[in-house]
Amino acid sequence: MDLTAFAVFAEHLNFTRAAAELHISQPALHVKIRKLSESLGRPLYRREGRRLVLTADGEAVARFARGQRERLDQFLAEFAGAPAQRPVVLAAGQGAYLYLLGDTIQAALATTPLRLVNCDHRQMLAAVRGGQAHVGVSVLDVLPPDLTVRELASFPQTLFVPAGHRLAGRRSVRLRDLAGAALVVPPQHRPQRVMLEQALRAAGASWTVAVEAEGWPLISHFVALGVGLAIVNGCVPPPAGSAAIPVADLPPVTYHVVHQPSALTDARVAGLLDLLG
């Protein structure tokens, strides 16, 4: 079974690019993948429109193939007395990188090659499941049963208001206190936006959109400019001239660390997980 070829194919999901990386022809790669699929008795990929996607069995084989490839590289490097070159891959979103993971990344880079992937939580879970990432960090509404998950940190949701605003001196606020407010919010259909709309509606608080913004830094910037108020994760520092007030009737935001159950067998990955606490 040519697992190496399938691992490369799974990275690209494109026969042209995968064949080029393997330095073989496309027909030869097609033959390798077909023979592997036949030997396992399962289809490993399917076509969805113009895209190729792995089946669930294909993801499992790709994960095994990547792991085998990494273990071989590690063994050969150790056998030759040289440091392993393949990096540990960490997948997380912008907020986690900006406000949670800086110290961990600096500490890890002192001892381990590290590759960072910036992605949303769905892409993170897909990367960990498929073996493209060793460790993921994100806020998760539903915990995946097939992966090992633990809490990293939990924060209240907070309201950013200019220092001179009527709510600025409060120790906490409730959503009904925001009636009539203009809010800086994420674009429609983003999870944070959906959650806010549902919660404000349930609280009976009417509000308007001051501006839609992608990412906590831009949202914070608009608050600093006086464009509107914003509800953000409590790990985000308030911009200059603004106050951060916990929102009492919103649940805390919890970041989780995610990895494959077998990840601890890799000392490099185990080291990164130790640094994450």
Image (cartoon, rainbow, N blue to C red):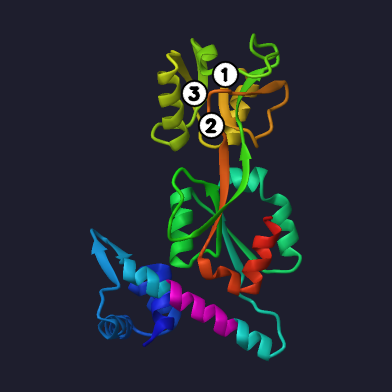
Disc 1, SS: loop
Q: Dot 3: few (<14), some (14–19), or many (≥20) neighbours within 10 Å?
A: some
At x 49%, y 66%, the residue is 132
At x 41%, y 31%, the residue is 194
Residue that lies at the very extreme toward the bottom in this rendered image: 79
Magenta span of residues: 63-73
Q: In this view, does 273 lie to the left or right of 43?
A: right
At x 45%, y 17%, the residue is 203
Q: Mark 2 points at which residue?
A: 251
Q: Name the residue under label 1.
A: 227
Amino acid type, mark 2: Pro
Q: Mark 3 points at which residue?
A: 211
The CA distance from mark 1 to mark 2 is 26 Å
Mark number displayed over residue 129: none
- Quadrant placement of the N terminus: bottom left
The CA distance from mark 1 to mark 3 is 8 Å
Tell me: residue 37, above or below residue 123: below
Q: In this view, does 63 lie to the left or right of 78?
A: left
Amino acid type, mark 3: Val
Tell me: residue 133, above or below residue 223: below
Disc 3, SS: strand
Q: Do the residues labelled 1 and 3 touch (CB within 8 Å)?
A: yes
Residue 17 visible, this orientation: no
Q: Dot 1: few (<14), some (14–19), or many (≥20) neighbours within 10 Å?
A: some
Tell me: residue 97, above or below residue 275: above
